[in-house]
Image (tube, rainbow, N blue to C red):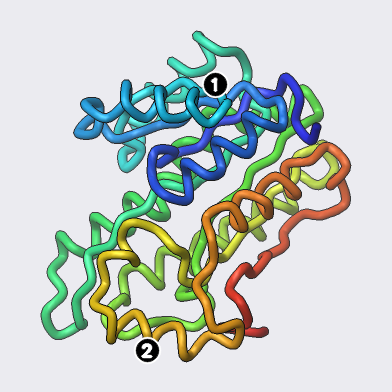
């Protein structure tokens, strides 16, 4: 098992990709804690029950990772209840798509705060502990659109590109301390959001993917588990694309 008895925190853990990551890490032996926004607390019991049905144990803590105070309080609660964090997967994310002509400051700030700043807000409270203990895995979930850009997503693309910049800089700081930081950049993944697309839009997307299909959340979870593995000691600062050949760089 890649992470037996390690405490693993997955922000945005009740989302499509987040759930798959939580399930995989739990089955790999980790003590998994998912985070969710306070507005999602009515879903917690159902989500935990579904995880149990799938053969995995996971806890959920609600908090707002888009603010410095919220991130600090949330991570403090997790450490107090479950112990020091060994693996942190920054998966929280939202979209507020709009062309630059119409994009509001609120749309920009909401995406930057949730998709980019949150990574700093939740990593900072546990970073020193990882360094002092000589072990840590930080895995940032970016996006293919952070690599290539996307029409109507100046906020989202900027946040996801910035997330890998955060990865690269922090990798230098953790390299000699046993702490690795890497990015996973998914392409289009089969989730409730993509399933709700119109058939013609979905078909157009798939036709542009060399593998002629969308990815599965489990394929992202596999990449995360690989990077979280204690044997992946010599991989840091990397951006692992999981996009079916949609963008090759």
From where the camera sits, is residue 129 visible? no
Residue placed most toward the observer, 83 or 191: 191
Q: Look at mark 2 in the image and give the residue it sits on.
A: 204
The answer to whether residue 176 is above or below residue 186 is: above
Disc 1, SS:
loop
Q: Position of residue 21 (x, y in %)?
A: 56, 43
Q: Specify the label residue 31 is tagged with.
A: none
The answer to whether residue 43 is above or below residue 106 is: above
| Mark 1 → mark 2, Cα distance in angstroms | 38 Å
Residue at x-position 47% and y-position 65%:
189
Q: Is residue 215 left or right of residue 177?
A: left
Q: Position of residue 94 (x, y in %)?
A: 31, 55
Q: Quadrant of the C terminus?
A: bottom right
Residue placed most toward the observer, 118 or 50: 50
Q: Is residue 235 left or right of residue 92?
A: right
Q: Quadrant of the N terminus?
A: top right
Disc 2, SS:
helix
Q: Look at mark 1 in the image and give the residue it sits on.
A: 57
Q: Could you tell me how many numbered marks the image carries?
A: 2
Residue pushed farthest front? 53
The answer to whether residue 221 is above or below residue 214 is: above
Residue at x-position 37% and y-position 52%:
93
Residue placed most toward the observer, 81 or 75: 81
Q: Position of residue 162 (x, y in %)?
A: 49, 64
* Earlier sequence position, callout 1 versus callout 2: 1
Q: Is residue 20 left or right of residue 14?
A: right
Q: Position of residue 230 (x, y in %)?
A: 83, 37
């Amino acid at each position: 098992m890649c992470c037996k008895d390690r405490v693993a925190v997955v922000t945005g853990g009740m989302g499509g990709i987040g759930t798959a990551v939580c399930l995989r890490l739990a089955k790999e032996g980790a003590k998994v804690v998912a985070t969710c926004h306070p507005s999602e607390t009515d879903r917690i019991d159902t989500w935990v029950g579904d995880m149990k049905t799938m053969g995995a144990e996971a806890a959920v803590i609600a908090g707002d990772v888009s603010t410095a105070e919220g991130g600090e309080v949330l991570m403090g609660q997790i450490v107090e209840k479950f112990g020091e964090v060994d693996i942190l997967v920054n998966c929280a994310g939202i979209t507020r798509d709009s062309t630059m002509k119409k994009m509001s400051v609120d749309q920009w700030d909401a995406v930057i705060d949730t998709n980019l700043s949150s990574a700093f807000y939740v990593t900072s409270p546990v970073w020193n502990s990882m360094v002092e203990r000589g072990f840590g895995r930080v895995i940032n979930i970016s996006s293919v659109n952070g690599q290539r850009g996307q029409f109507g997503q100046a906020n989202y693309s900027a946040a996801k590109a910035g997330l890998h910049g955060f990865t690269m800089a922090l990798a230098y700081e953790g390299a000699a301390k046993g702490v690795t930081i890497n990015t996973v950049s998914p392409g289009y993944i089969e989730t409730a959001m993509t399933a709700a697309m119109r058939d013609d839009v979905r078909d157009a997307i798939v036709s542009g993917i060399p593998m002629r299909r969308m990815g599965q959340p489990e394929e992202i979870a596999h990449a995360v588990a690989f990077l979280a593995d204690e044997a992946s000691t010599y991989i840091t600062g990397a951006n692992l694309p999981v996009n079916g050949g949609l963008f090759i760089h």
